[in-house]
Image (spheres, rainbow, N blue to C red):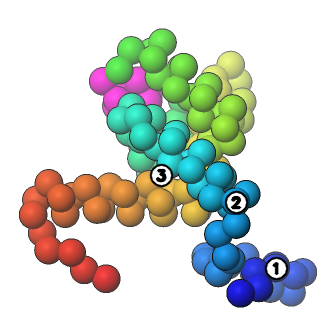
Amino acid sequence: MKPIVESAHEPASLTHPATPDQQRLEAATSTFRMLADPTRLHILWLLTQGEADVTALTESCAASRTAVSQHLAKLRFTGLVETRKEGRRVVYRIRDGHLARLVREGMNHADHVVTGEPPHE
């Protein structure tokens, strides 16, 4: 299967039907590895709701400021979050819609597991 390449005339797609070669498998594994920590996943889920600074994320995560800052540094280093300056504050945002959808779907799946709601398509 040939990967779809975005041209100047086509909008970005939500799906990329590419065969999972080694490079794609490693990139996906790296992303899943970063999602495998409850605090990082919580931070990313919060960022699917909108931008936030360390103070807001710390209050919402019930984790120490140091822990949240360390997790944000890892997420930034791996390219899952981006930052912008707002005066002296650093504001974080999730990198892209694919990651936001992945995080939301993971939490939707978890909701089914926890509540016992039957699976669906």
- Label 1, secondary structure: give it: loop
The residue at the point 25 percent across, 56 percent down is 110
The residue at the point 61 percent across, 76 percent down is 14
Q: Residue furthest front?
A: 22
The tag earlier along the polypeptide, 1 or 3, is 1
Between 23 and 61, which is closer to the camera in this rendering? 23
The residue that label 1 is drawn on is 5
Q: Is residue 70 left or right of residue 111?
A: right
Res 53 quadrant in image:
top right
Res 59 quadrant in image:
top left
Magenta residues (range): 54-62
Label for residue 22?
A: 2
Q: Say if mark 1 contacts mark 3, CB within 8 Å.
A: no
The tag earlier along the polypeptide, 3 or 2, is 2
- Label 2, secondary structure: give it: helix
- Nearer to us of marks 3 and 2 is 2
The residue that label 3 is drawn on is 48
Say few, some or many: other residues with alpha carbon within 10 Å of mark 1 (under 14 / 14 to 19 / 20 or more). Answer: few
The tag earlier along the polypeptide, 2 or 1, is 1
Main secondary structure found in the magenta portion = helix
Residue type, label 3 = Thr
Residue 94, visible in the rendered structure: no
28 shown above or below 1 = above
